[in-house]
Image: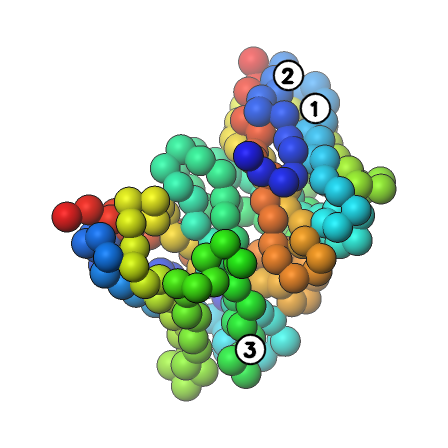
C-alpha cells in the first residue's frame, strides 16, 4: 500500500525558508490521477491545508499562504516538495504530506508528520 | 476560528452512540463532498469517511457519515475506549481550497 514520509530540518531560523520533502513509496506518484497535498497542524491546534500538486505539476495553494509557498514534484524520484519562505514563529507546526484529493474526495494516506520549529 | 464549525467536545459511555456535527455554508459543504478524520493522540490523522458517506477499506461500519444542505454529521456507534480521539471534518471552499473544522475531542467515559 502507498506510504508517505516527510523529511527535512526540524529547526528553521526566522526569515529563512522552510523546505520539506515527501517521499512516496508503495506506488507511483504519477498513477491514479491523484493530487498530493501538504497540511500542517500548529501545536495543540487544528489542521490547516497548505496546498496540493498534481503529477503533472499543477498546483493550488491556500490563499492565506500563497505568496510564500511553492510546491513542486519530481516524478522520477517519487517525491514532492514544500517550500515556505520568510518564515516566522507562526509557521511552527507539524507538517504532514498526504495523498488527495483523487479517487474520492479525501486525504489518504497521511505521512507521520514532521515538527518544524521556527526559532533563532 | 474555523469556517467549518464543530463542537469542541462530545462524550458518551462505552457501547453508546455519539454524533459529531460539522456546520458550514453554501460555498463549502453546500457544494462539496465532506470527509472525516480521526486523530489519535500523537499520531497523524486517518481518513474515516470520504464523499460524505463512504468508508475506506478497513474502517468499521460503526463509523458513518451523512450530509444535508450545509451541514454534515459523523456517527459512531458501539463506542469503544479506543475511539477516544480528535475528529475533524473537511470540505472544499468553492471547490478550490480545502477547509478543516476546528476538531472535536471525543471522550469515552
Tell me the number on the disc at residue A21.
none
Question: What is the quadrant of residue A42 in the picture?
Answer: top left
Q: Residue at x 29, y 59 (%)?
A: A86
For disc 1, the marked residue is B18
Instruction: Using residue A15 as the reference point, say whether residue A33 is left or right of it.
Output: right
Front residue (pair B10, B84): B10
Residue for badge 2: B12
Q: Is residue B28 left or right of residue A45?
A: right
Q: Looking at this view, is B95 or B77 the one in front?
A: B95
The residue indicated by pointer 3 is A58
Question: Callout 3: few (<14), some (14-19), or many (20+) C-alpha neighbours within 10 Å?
Answer: few
Question: Cα distance, mark 2 to mark 3?
Answer: 44 Å
Q: Which sits earlier in the primary sequence, circle 1 or circle 2?
A: 2
- Secondary structure of residue under mark 3: loop
Determine the chain carrying the residue at label 3: A
Q: Residue at x 72, y 40 (%)?
A: B24
Report the chain holding disc 2: B
Q: Are marks 1 and 2 on the same chain?
A: yes
Residue A1: x, y in percent?
52, 65
Which element type, helix, strand or loop, lies under badge 2? strand
- Tell me residue A37's x, y (percent): 51, 63
Kindly identify which chain the residue marked by label 1 belongs to. Answer: B
Tag in front: 2 or 3: 3
Front: mark 3 or 1: 3
- For label 2, the crowd category at 10 Å Cα-Cα, with few meaning under 14, some 14 to 19 and many 20 or more, is some
Residue at image coords 43%, 75%: A72
Position of residue A58 measured from the top left corner of the image (x, y, whole percent): 55, 77
Marks 3 and 1 close (CB-CB < 8 Å): no
Amino acid at each position: 500500500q502507498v506510504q508517505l514520509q516527510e523529511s527535512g530540518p526540524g529547526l528553521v531560523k526566522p526569515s529563512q525558508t522552510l523546505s520539506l520533502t515527501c517521499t512516496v513509496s508503495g506506488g507511483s506518484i504519477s498513477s491514479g490521477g491523484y493530487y498530493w497535498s501538504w497540511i500542517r497542524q500548529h501545536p495543540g491546534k487544528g489542521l490547516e491545508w497548505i496546498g496540493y500538486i498534481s503529477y503533472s505539476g499543477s498546483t493550488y495553494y491556500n490563499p492565506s499562504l500563497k505568496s510564500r509557498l511553492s510546491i513542486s514534484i519530481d516524478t522520477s524520484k517519487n517525491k514532492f516538495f514544500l517550500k515556505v519562505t520568510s518564515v516566522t514563529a507562526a509557521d511552527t507546526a507539524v507538517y504532514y504530506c498526504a495523498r488527495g484529493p483523487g479517487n474520492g474526495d479525501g486525504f489518504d494516506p497521511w505521512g507521520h508528520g514532521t515538527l518544524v520549529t521556527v526559532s533563532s | 476560528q474555523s469556517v467549518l464549525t464543530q463542537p469542541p467536545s462530545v462524550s458518551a459511555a462505552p457501547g453508546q452512540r455519539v454524533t459529531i456535527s460539522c456546520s458550514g455554508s453554501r460555498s463549502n459543504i453546500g457544494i462539496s463532498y465532506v470527509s472525516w478524520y480521526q486523530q489519535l493522540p500523537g499520531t497523524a490523522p486517518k481518513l474515516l469517511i470520504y464523499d460524505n458517506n463512504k468508508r475506506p477499506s478497513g474502517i468499521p461500519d460503526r463509523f458513518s457519515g451523512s450530509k444535508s444542505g450545509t451541514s454534515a454529521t459523523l456517527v459512531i456507534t458501539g463506542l469503544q475506549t479506543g475511539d477516544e480521539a480528535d475528529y475533524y471534518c473537511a470540505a472544499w471552499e468553492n471547490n478550490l481550497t480545502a477547509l478543516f473544522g476546528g476538531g472535536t475531542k471525543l471522550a469515552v467515559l
